[in-house]
Image (cartoon, rainbow, N blue to C red):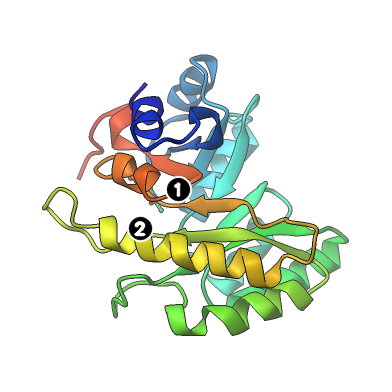
């Protein structure tokens, strides 16, 4: 309901924005309950949790995205097992995903993660390096570039991330215009979490990743 209200108040159609339930630290049973309650997409950010939930069949009835930091030595455990890897933020990782997808004979959908706040501590490609990385992704036969993802800086101030979301939308529009040669695979802009998804929707998100607002606070 909050997503729909945010869409409508910015003149967007609610059906153009999808919800990814961020299921980190949740149990198999909680994930099953969320899916029974209508969740159609889960986002996992640790390889170990992803592997365990997959083995337990906990995601049955929903799609799964990988949304966390991915080390190249763990791509084997993710490529081909999730519908979308949202967090490809370097050439090194992009090439590792391509290599594994090639080996498995499949095409892996990916988003490029952008370090929109230019934070030292964060993964993701610098905005200025996005274009060459997107071109590389487009040229690789076993990855399909579907769009962009961002995690802006943590801020306690409401509304503080709106300028970052607006910048992401501009990058998304530019990349889509420059890269989509008629096929228009680039349709996903993943941004916004529990504290700021309404602002992200107002600025053009097509996918929001929400954990706390669905499941309650996580243990520290
Ligand atoms: C945990 C997580 C979220 C959701 O965070 P909440 O603030 O609990 O909504 C979104 N994206 C990523 C990458 C996450 O790891």
Between 175 and 102, the one lying in front of the other is 175
Circles 1 and 2: CB distance less than 8 Å? yes
Categorize mark 1 by other alpha carbons within 10 Å: few (<14), some (14-19), many (20+).
Answer: many
* Residue 122, horizontal then vertical, whole percent: 34, 72
* Residue 109, horizontal then vertical, whole percent: 70, 56
Give the Cα distance between marks 1 and 2.
Answer: 8 Å
Between 71 and 2, the one lying in front of the other is 2
Q: Which residue was labeled with disc 1?
A: 205
| In the displayed structure image, the side of residue 33 where residue 80 appears, left or right | right
The reply to whether the residue tagged 2 has its Cβ within 8 angstroms of ligand 1 is no
| Point 16% across, 57% down: residue | 155
Residue at the far front in the pictured view:
11
Visible residue check, residue 109: yes
Between 147 and 209, the one lying in front of the other is 147
Q: Secondary structure at mark 1?
A: loop
Sequence-first disc among 1 and 2: 2
Q: Secondary structure at mark 2?
A: helix
Which quadrant: the C terminus? top left
Residue at the far top in the pictured view:
37
| In the displayed structure image, the side of residue 75 where residue 21 appears, left or right | left
| Point 59% across, 69% down: residue | 175
Q: Residue 204, relative to residue 95: is it above or below?
A: above
* Residue 212, horizontal then vertical, whole percent: 29, 35
Mark linked to residue 40: none
Which quadrant: the N terminus? top left
Q: Which residue was labeled with disc 2?
A: 165
| Point 30% across, 71% down: residue | 117
């Amino acid at each position: 309901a909050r997503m729909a209200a945010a869409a409508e108040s910015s003149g967007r159609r609610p059906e153009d924005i999808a919800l990814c339930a961020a299921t980190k630290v949740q149990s198999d049973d909680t994930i099953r309950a969320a899916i029974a309650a209508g969740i159609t997409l889960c986002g996992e950010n640790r390889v170990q949790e992803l592997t365990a939930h997959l083995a337990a069949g906990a995601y049955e009835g929903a799609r799964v995205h990988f949304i966390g930091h991915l080390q190249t030595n763990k791509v084997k455990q993710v490529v081909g097992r999730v519908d979308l890897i949202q967090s490809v933020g370097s050439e090194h990782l992009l090439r590792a995903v391509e290599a594994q997808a090639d080996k498995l004979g499949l095409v892996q959908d990916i988003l490029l993660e952008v370090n929109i706040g230019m934070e030292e501590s964060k993964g993701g490609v610098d905005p200025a390096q996005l274009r060459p990385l997107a071109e590389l992704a487009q040229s690789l036969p076993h990855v399909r570039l579907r769009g962009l993802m961002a995690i802006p800086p943590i801020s306690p101030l409401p509304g503080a991330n709106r300028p970052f979301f607006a910048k992401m939308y501009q990058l998304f529009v530019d990349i889509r215009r420059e890269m989509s040669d008629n096929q228009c695979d680039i349709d996903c802009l993943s941004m916004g979490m529990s504290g700021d998804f309404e602002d992200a929707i107002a600025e053009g998100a097509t996918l929001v990743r929400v954990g706390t607002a669905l499941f309650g606070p996580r243990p520290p």
